Image (tube, rainbow, N blue to C red):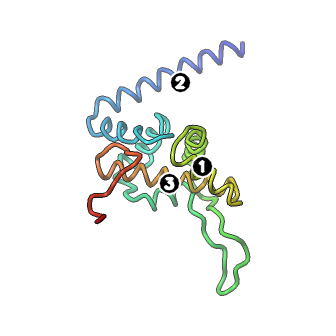
Amino acid sequence: MNKEEIALLSHHIESLEKEMDLVIKSDGELSEKSALMQSIPGVGRVLTWMFLAKTENFRNITTARKMACYSGVVPFDHQSGSSIRFRPRVSMFSDRSLKSVLHLASMSVIRSENDLRSYYLRKVSEGKNKMLVLNNIRNKIIHRIFAVVNSGRNYEKNYQNNLVCP
């Protein structure tokens, strides 16, 4: 009986994923933004869908800093006046579903060979807490997503800014 339920739920999930893909492919703007986001290492279909839904196609949340606060990856100080009682912590009022998908993306990106993996290994070897470094990687993924969407260009690993003088 449980196997039948699992098979039925798997079938429903597949049909919903196909419908979401069709909706994104039918709209040119959504399709373009989806392709831009998926050019970033670690960003897949689910994170793309979440970002498009949570930001309402980048109309509701327009900056990476706001999205980082919304998704709960920015630490806040706990202080009252001049006393600092606790170390900075992330907010408990964040969107936990988005934060969990970002966590999976950060775990995925540190398994493959790229610049965020080298960042992770360097920070851990310096003695930083692993979860702190993963939180920083989540923040970097959010900022990269907003950078490629705002610029309209695919992610480039070794991007050189033409405005900077050599």
Residue 127 picture quarter? bottom right
Residue 131's place in the image compared with 17, above or below, is below
SS state under label 2 = helix
Local crowd size for mark 1, using a 10 Å CA cut-off: few (<14), some (14–19), many (≥20)? few
Q: Residue at point 73% right, 77% down?
A: 85
Relative height, residue 56 to residue 126 (above, below): above
Left/right of residue 16 with respect to residue 150 in the rendered view: right
Q: Out of 38 and 67, give the one closest to the viewer.
A: 38
Q: Secondary structure at mark 1?
A: helix
**Which circle marks residue 140 in the picture?**
3
Q: Nearer the viewer, residue 79 or 105?
A: 105
Residue found 69% across the figure and 14% down from its top: 3
Q: Looking at the picture, which amino acid does disc 2 mark?
A: Ile
Q: Which residue is mark 2?
A: 13
In the picture, the disc for residue 96 is 1
Of the image marks 2 and 1, the number of the one nearer the N terminus: 2
- Which of the 4 quarters of the picture holds residue 22? top left
**Label 2 vs label 1: CA separation?**
21 Å
The answer to whether marks 3 and 2 mark residues whose Cβ atoms lie closer than 8 Å is no
